[in-house]
Image: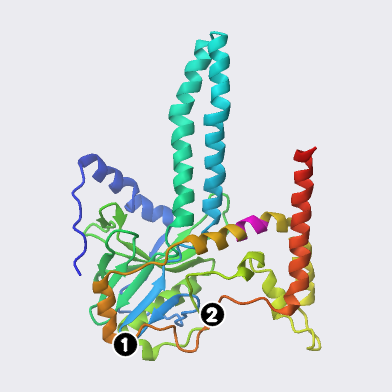
């Protein structure tokens, strides 16, 4: 399958991209570290846990990790859009009416300028973030074909970007948040570089594929890349089994999981003598009782977003290529990462959710008065 032709950019666009978009400055800021060739091992043990959707003898389908904050960004976008449109449709008419009646022409001009320059564009931007996050796609998939030595990157409604596996450069990327000098998030990127070492673009899309989700542990990120690399170079027979596989839909338990704290209750076996996880569960319970009201809306937004999102669908030609290796199935021996609620979790769910709704009721009482 041929990749979409690269568009010719103007002088200004080329200069802007050269300076800031995946050029030398960008590589310095993002802390790129070359991992050598895709044909050379990294020394890390391959790990495909929570990485693979489906695979067969010739094709591997994984996620790009673009769903890490799904629903959360959309919720923030919805709040921002409501704030902007409230200012535009409710507050602005009052200011305009007051300025007109009192002949405050400076206030009138300032209000109209704020509407046109700030409130309307920002409202549309936040609305776009909400719609894209809640009604987009569950994940930006990658498909690796070890027979054709190709990588296809899903980019939504347009044709997937085709990459040549043998020409890709793997890099370990480190990103340090602006408010932190300690924590550096790591991920592995497969980058298509030009002769000058800058990233090539396919239209407006950089030819960069992200392997798995970001992690604070660089070796964990490299292990996921090594799983993909060994699949392409050695085949699936040489890969270790995966503990879990990825799914496109969530379950109800994800709403009340409270960012993983509920797993502590699930993993504790109260019948086992000397069980030591109780202290951690007590701390988690106190934490969720105090701050569960803040977690619950984001968990609910993530659940709704995954339910509303579309599952990516590959073009027929790419699907036909995968038929060479047989039926695309989940990794052998892997279990679902989406778990159902068990009885010993119920008391903690009721306690944490009850405390959250108590806070909501208390806040609502102030508006009802």
- Which x, y percent locates residue 353? 74, 62
Marks 2 and 1 sit apart, C-alpha to C-alpha, by 22 Å
Q: How many numbered discs sit on the rendered protein? A: 2
Residue designated by label 2: 336
Please state which of residues 323 and 285 is positioned toward the viewer in this rendering. 323
| Among numbered discs 2 and 1, the one appearing first in the sequence | 1
Picture residue at 75% right of the left edge, 56% below the top: 357
Q: Secondary structure at mark 2?
A: strand
Q: Is residue 110 above or below residue 367?
A: above
**Is 86 inside the magenta-drawn segment?**
no
Task: Decide: few, some or many residues near mark 1? Use Cα within 10 Å; few <14, some 14-19, many ≥20.
Answer: few
- Which x, y percent locates residue 10? 20, 42
- Which x, y percent locates residue 216? 54, 66
The quarter of the picture where residue 98 lies is: top right
Predominant SS along the magenta part:
helix
Q: Is residue 92 above or below residue 103?
A: below
The quarter of the picture where residue 28 lies is: bottom left
- Look at the image and tell me in which quarter the C terminus lies: top right
Q: Secondary structure at mark 1?
A: loop
- Which x, y percent locates residue 162? 25, 67
Find residue 326 and name its label.
1
Picture residue at 45% right of the left edge, 42% below the top: 125
Please state which of residues 336 and 343 is positioned toward the viewer in this rendering. 343
Note whether residue 97 is visible: yes
- Look at the image and tell me in which quarter the N terminus lies: bottom left
Dot 2 and dot 1 residues touching (CB under 8 Å): no
Note whether residue 165 is visible: no
Left or right for 240, reference 35: right
Task: Decide: few, some or many residues near mark 2? Use Cα within 10 Å; few <14, some 14-19, many ≥20.
Answer: few
Find residue 14 and name its label.
none
Q: Which residues are magenta?
A: 295-299
């Amino acid at each position: 399958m041929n990749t979409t032709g690269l568009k010719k950019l103007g002088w200004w666009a080329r200069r802007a991209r050269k300076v800031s978009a995946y050029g030398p400055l960008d590589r310095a800021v993002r802390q790129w570290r070359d991992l050598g060739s895709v044909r050379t091992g990294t020394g890390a043990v391959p790990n495909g846990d929570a990485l693979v959707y489906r695979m067969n003898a010739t094709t591997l389908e994984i996620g790009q990790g673009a769903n890490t904050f799904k629903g959360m960004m959309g919720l923030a976008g919805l709040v921002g859009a409501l704030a902007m449109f409230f200012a535009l449709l409710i507050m602005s008419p009052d200011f305009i009416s007051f300025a007109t009646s009192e002949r405050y022409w400076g206030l009138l001009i300032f209000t109209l300028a704020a509407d046109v320059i700030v409130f309307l564009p920002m409202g549309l931007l936040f609305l776009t973030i909400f719609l894209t996050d809640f009604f987009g796609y569950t994940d930006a998939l990658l498909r690796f074909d070890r027979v054709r030595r190709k990588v296809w990157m899903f980019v939504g409604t347009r044709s997937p970007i085709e990459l040549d596996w043998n020409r890709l450069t793997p890099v370990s990327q480190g990103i340090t948040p602006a408010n932190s000098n300690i924590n550096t998030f790591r991920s592995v990127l497969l980058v298509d570089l030009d002769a000058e070492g800058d990233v090539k673009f396919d239209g407006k899309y950089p030819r960069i594929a992200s392997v798995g989700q970001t992690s604070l542990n660089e070796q964990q990120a490299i292990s996921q890349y090594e799983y993909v690399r060994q699949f392409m170079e050695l085949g699936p027979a040489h890969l270790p089994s995966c503990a879990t596989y990825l799914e496109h839909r969530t379950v109800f338990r994800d709403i009340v999981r409270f960012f993983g704290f509920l797993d502590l209750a699930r993993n504790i076996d109260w019948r086992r003598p000397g069980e030591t996880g109780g202290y951690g569960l007590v701390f988690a319970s106190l934490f969720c009782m105090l701050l569960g009201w803040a977690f619950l809306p984001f968990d609910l937004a993530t659940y709704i977003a995954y339910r509303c999102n579309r599952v990516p669908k590959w073009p027929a030609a790419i699907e036909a290529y995968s038929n060479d290796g047989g039926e695309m199935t989940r990794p052998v021996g892997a279990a679902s990462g989406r778990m159902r609620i068990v009885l010993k979790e119920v008391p903690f769910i009721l306690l944490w959710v009850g405390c959250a709704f108590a806070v909501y009721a208390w806040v609502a009482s102030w508006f009802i008065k």
